[in-house]
Amino acid sequence: METTLRGVGVSHGVAIGEVRHMGTAVLEPPAREIAAEEAEREKGRARKAVEAVAADLTARGNLAGGEAQAVLEAQAMMAQDPELMADVERRIAGNSTAERAVYDAFAAYRELLAAAGEYLAGRVADLDDVRNRIVARLLGVPMPGVPDSDEPYVLVARDLAPADTALLDPALVLGFVTEEGGPTSHSAILARALGVPAVVALPGAGELAEGTLIAVDGSTGEIFVNPSEEKKGQLEAAAAARRAALSASTGPGVTADGHTVPLLANIGGPADVPAAVEAGAEGVGLFRTEFLFLDDSENAPSEEKQVAAYRQVLEAFPEGRVVVRVLDAGADKPLDFLTPADEPNPALGVRGLRSLLDHPEVLRTQLAALVKASEGLSVHLEVMAPMVADRADAKAFADACREAGLHAKFGAMVEIPSAALRARSILQEVEFLSLGTNDLAQYTFAADRQVGAVSRLQDPWQPALLDLVALSAEAAKAEGKSCGVCGEAASDPLLASVLTGLGVTSLSMGAASIPYVRAALAKFTLAQCERAAAAARATDSAEEARRAAQAVLSGE
Ligand code: PEP
Ligand code: MG
């Protein structure tokens, strides 16, 4: 019998196929005491396994490139953490086997993170994944991860570690469904980068029996279990219609009545540029530069390394716009040389621009690298700061840009509600705003973006979030300046039309979403978008807002 489940759609498209579960069994090695003379051999085995897993993660990263590479390299570094290794060796000296010592040392590290109040859900998933890989290698059993299958399937997991999402083969993996993870988690961002339909935060996903036929609608978040022939037909027809509309849509972002809304790409580095160009991005709306820093969290990359990476990106858009975000470290992206280790709540601590103002030399180097990288190029370079809270923050950033001699527009990201509420005051210091709706939702609703259980509050359709978007866009209009969106909200085609109606002036998203958003915008006039935005804001919940906008735009 057909049943319907509802999660959060995070990557467009329809996938119909059989369920295959991710091999996530936690391998708990037996607690066996070893003789003292075995200790050296066990230490050697542990070291070799750690090195092999780190090398494997690095190789997967090289294969995947882009944002995935930075995440995998960060995991490889986690595996080689010298303190963890010292703890493993201490446990072996206390008569543990190598596998048990690794298992216990990682468990202790995990607890330490939790006890310190550092709830880094995304990092904990990464840490567990690294541990499982090392233990599996030591036990000589298959690696946990993507199942072996020659037939295409829908991958179902509790959560997907970056190591796995990075290697999903779109030809074999039709789509994926996870029990955990929110719409702005890094797994969701990676899924969109791969162009694989995905639904996250689906309670009970783990109970779907292996081999069950399901249909995944990554746009609506619906999962149809044992879909009828009729339902399959409907979904396939809708997907085919969407594909046809997409291939017909090219060119710049524009509404049906000619109101232009540039469609830009979110990238993590030069490796993401080809997909952005292929999708017809009119430039880059968010270059997350911290991915250049994640491969060595103890040192900032040299100015030369930064110049080379920035130049490659800037050269790809000779007449376009490239918005570079200065380093956004801290919270879910900690860097040892910048991020305080003992913060009780890192998301509310010294992160983003706050870290850079505490370490002005890091900001100076980054801005100097941008000056050099942009020399002689006609690209429109714009530079923005993450986590701007008030006018003083905006002024400090603009001063640093001026001192560096940067010929670019300086902007502020609106990610903290205070910045939206006082947008006009911030605009006295900078030339544009860019709404980071992922963090803006996190801080507006006090809902950690990594936690599946609060994904309802992470929904960018929440009317309170739409109000803050409207406030920012109105402030920018009053000041004669621009206000884009570069958070994941921009990648939802229906919401993109609503954001346009709220007065947003550009939309930046993962490259795979650009054709969907372009096709949706082209269907409606600006006045229709404005009516849909007003209808959405007049509701009291994300679900009602979505329905109200849909009703206006489908002429119901
Ligand atoms: C955001 O917060 O919306 C954003 C674009 O930045 P990031 O996702 O990198 O925190
Ligand atoms: Mg952010």
Image (spheres, grey):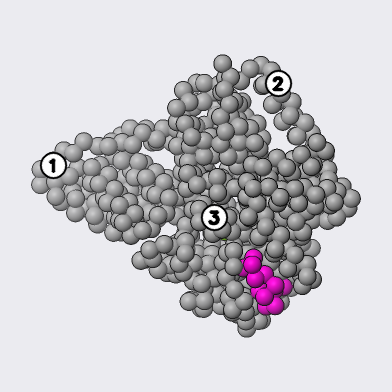
Q: Are marks 2 and 1 in contact (CB under 8 Å)?
A: no
Q: Is mark 3 within 8 Å of ligand 1?
A: no
The residue furthest bottom is 403
Q: Residues within 10 Å of mark 3 (few under 14, many from 20)?
A: some
Q: Which residue is mark 3?
A: 445
Q: Are marks 1 and 3 in contact (CB under 8 Å)?
A: no
What is the distance, in whole Å, between disc 2 and disc 1 at their CAs? Answer: 61 Å
Residue type indicated by callout 2: Gly
Q: Which residue is mark 1?
A: 34
Residue type indicated by callout 1: Ile
In terms of sequence position, does the residue under pointer 1 or pointer 3 come before the other?
Answer: 1
- Start-end of magenta stretch: 419-431
Q: Is residue 428 visible?
A: yes
Q: Please tell me how many numbered marks the rendered image carries.
A: 3
| Residue 346, above or below 221 | below
Please tell me which residue is depicted at 75% across the width and 34% down the height of the picture.
Answer: 243
